[in-house]
Amino acid sequence: MAAAKIREEIEVPEGVELKLSGKAIEVSGPKGKLARNFDVPGIEMRMEGKKILIEISSTRRKHRAALGMVRARLVNMFKGVTTGFTYKLRVVYSHFPITIKIEGKRALIQNFLGERAPRMAKIVGGVNVEVKGEEIIVQGIDRDEVGQTAFNIEQATFIRHRDPRVFQDGCYIVGRA
């Protein structure tokens, strides 16, 4: 008896170029180029015209989840090279005015709760961070890098050993697109 196969077809959007070699995929579009190696056991990928076919030979839950992960990553890569990803953070303070400065690959958060030493957040990969008054805008084509950078900025202002209902100062993610 032949083993059941699960198969996914993903349409490649207009304006997106895709190169597939084995399990390595390179996607390029108007915003830039992304490459990723999907070294997932049991998954086979191939191109058929303007579609990419992903097959897995097992119907086990773990393998179906891996197939869904590969599909989601590919769709995110397509969206990233066509429109990009944006996270918005809001700077909140009650007494000590917080200032944010971008220096190279890190964000400096100064005067947080009156602290003398600035807190630092790492900017990951090719992400662009822009500060406009009380708003921080994080933009890029790789969803993982944009999300990680926004989280790093939010986590740098996490307050320990104080009541979070009273001390609400910090940088918080308020929107994503």
Image: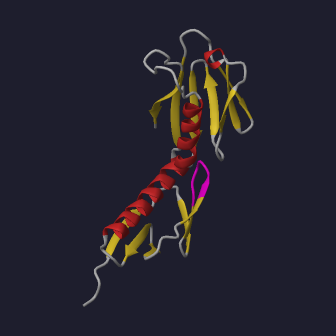
Residue 144 place in picture, x, y as percent: 54, 48
Q: Which residue is at the front of the view, 85 or 40?
A: 40
Residue 3 place in picture, x, y as percent: 29, 84
User: Is 138 rendered above or below residue 166?
Assistant: below
Residue that protrudes farthest toward the top in the picture: 95
> From where the camera sits, is residue 13 visible?
no
Residue that protrudes farthest toward the bottom in the picture: 1
What residue lies at 30% left-to-right and 74% top-to-bottom?
A: 59
Q: Which residue is at the front of the view, 69 or 115?
A: 115
41 relative to 148 in the view: left or right: left
In this picture, which residue range is highlighted in magenta? 27-34
Residue 126 place in picture, x, y as percent: 66, 46
Q: Which residue is at the front of the view, 31 or 62?
A: 62
130 relative to 144 in the view: left or right: right
Residue 94 place in picture, x, y as percent: 53, 10
- Quadrant of image for the N terminus: bottom left
User: Is 157 rendered above or below residue 15?
Assistant: above
What residue lies at 28% left-to-right and 88% top-to-bottom?
A: 2
> From where the camera sits, is residue 85 visible?
yes
Quadrant of residue 8 in the image? bottom left
Residue that protrudes farthest toward the front in the picture: 161
What residue lies at 47% left-to-right and 59% top-to-bottom?
A: 74
